Amino acid sequence: MEQEQSQDRFAALPRPPYFAVIFSSRRKDNDNDSYEAASDHMLSLAKRVPGFLGMESTRGTDGFGITVSYWTNEDAISTWKAQSENSVIRERGRWLWYDHFEVRVARVERAYGSH
Amino acid sequence: MEQEQSQDRFAALPRPPYFAVIFSSRRKDNDNDSYEAASDHMLSLAKRVPGFLGMESTRGTDGFGITVSYWTNEDAISTWKAQSENSVIRERGRWLWYDHFEVRVARVERAYGSH
């Protein structure tokens, strides 16, 4: 998903409140093809969960990345997490692709944009 | 701040609850020196606001970036926003450096990491 064109990178979101999962990670410098496949798989899982609103993701050349996914409610997040953890890809990913990651789950209370 | 070494990129945060400001933006391909200076200025302003907890930031080679700043309470965010808006740098930045940006203010309710 990190290869998308820039104009598609912003999530189109409803008015708050909704929920955000902020995933910060530092990639190992390895195995980019399998990482890209897994990343696409996580997004395709998310898109099938009712309550998924959108995702924004980017990573710098130093391997540090931030992905924020948006959800209508916490049950949807739990569903996505459970499906991901049942996925061999996710379990491999945690140890194979990342040196370190942090997850913060938050309730978005207000939002505004440049236009 | 996007030039920091990867090992320093994770914010050291207390246990939730706390607040997050998620700033997604698409940079214009221009004026990198002034942008870096302004970005550093925003971070230095934040560090002087009581209640600032940390910041994580990254940007891909396509110009799409995500910066998440963390705060103990919403008053601290308002203080930072007011100081930023009083800054010529911030006002220039909105129109000079970004094609588009979105801001979401959220209350972090739970968090976990890889170790």
Image (cartoon, coloured by chain):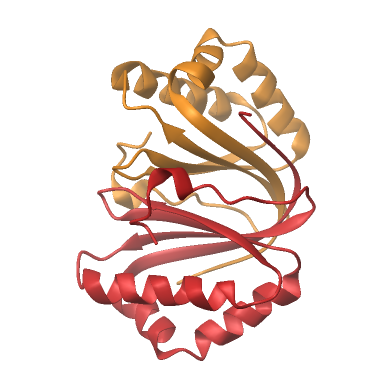
Chain colours: A orange, B red
The residue positioned 31% from the left and 50% from the top of the image is: A6
Side of B28 relative to B105 (left or right): left
Residue A76 percent location from the top left of the image: 71, 32
From the image, which quarter does the N terminus of chain B lie in? bottom left
From the image, which quarter does the C terminus of chain B lie in? top right
Residue at the left extreme of this rendering: B30
Quadrant of the rendered image containing residue A65:
top left
Q: Classify B67 as above or below A52.
A: below
Residue A95 percent location from the top left of the image: 51, 18
Badge count: 0
Residue A4 percent location from the top left of the image: 31, 39
Please state which of residues B44 and A75 is positioned toward the viewer in this rendering.
B44
Residue A37 percent location from the top left of the image: 38, 19
Residue at the top extreme of this rendering: A88
Side of A25 relative to B62 (left or right): right
> Does residue B69 appear in the picture of this structure?
no
Quadrant of the rendered image containing residue B39:
bottom left
Q: Classify B47 as above or below A54.
A: below
The residue positioned 71% from the left and 60% from the top of the image is: B19
> Does residue B113 appear in the picture of this structure?
yes
The residue positioned 78% from the left and 47% from the top of the image is: B15
Q: Classify A72 as above or below B36.
A: above
